Amino acid sequence: MTMELAYSSVLTGAPFMFYEFKLLVALKNQGNTDEEIRTKVLKENLFQLEKLSSIKRGLPYIIKRVNVLDKALRNFVIEEPFSMGKVINLYTIMKTDRLFFEFMNEVVAEKIVNQNLLLEKKDMNTFFAIKAEQNEAISTWTEQTVRKLQQVHTKILLEVGILKDKKSWELSRLIIDNQIKDHLIQIGDTKYIHALAE
């Protein structure tokens, strides 16, 4: 469960990465183990990144995301349109990253529900400041780490379409396919639907 997760800053090394996520979902569906996936990705440079260190850094977290999916959700990622896959990728990020889930739930969903569709820099700063006050681990993060996390959170919102652009900082409600919604309700993950302001 999300609330049992420790806060971490791993998103700085494994942001949205939808292409890589989809690739690993397909490998998982072919029956590959985590170790086989890891070997294949590194050997064949499936992520097509120049630096091996970048691959090694992000890979464990993407594998972790893939592992929270059941067969039905994995099939949605592979067989359904990109938009559905992106929503599922967002769900896995929330499910494996406590800070990002809380950001979605406490800042983004709250704003959308209240029709306050402007995400401001101060919203981000306030969120991180409150979390630093509440949690010792977060209070030890450098300013650079916090800034990088803010950038990654912003980029994820842009990639999934919740944030329209970086000029207006306008938020828009994510349209979630009923198949995903119904499935998440069925498996008891309703809180993630709420975090998506649905």
Image (tube, helix red, strand yellow):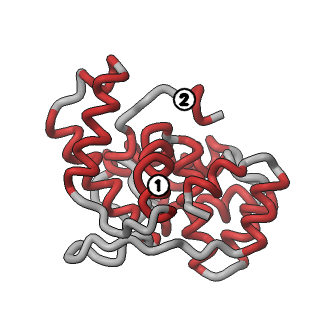
| Residue at x 49%, y 41% (from the top left corner) | 97
Please tell me in which quadrant of the rendered image residue 156 appears: bottom left
Quadrant in which the C terminus appears:
bottom right
- The residue type indicated by label 1 comes to Glu
Left or right, 70 with reference to 112: right
Measured in 3D between alpha carbons, the distance from the residue under mark 1 to the one under mark 2, in whole angstroms, is: 22 Å
Please state which of residues 182 and 12 is positioned toward the viewer in this rendering: 182
Number of disc labels: 2
List x then y, in percent, for residue 166: 23, 72
Furthest toward the left, the residue is 143
Residue drawn where x is 57% and y is 78% of the image: 83
Q: Are marks 1 and 2 in contact (CB under 8 Å)?
A: no
Residue 159: x percent and y percent?
40, 70
Residue 87 appears at what percent x and percent y?
A: 58, 67
Q: Residue at point 75% right, 56% down?
A: 184
Q: Is residue 39 left or right of residue 108?
A: right
- Can you identify the residue that label 2 sits on? 5
| Residue 110, numbered circle | 1
- Disc 1 element: helix
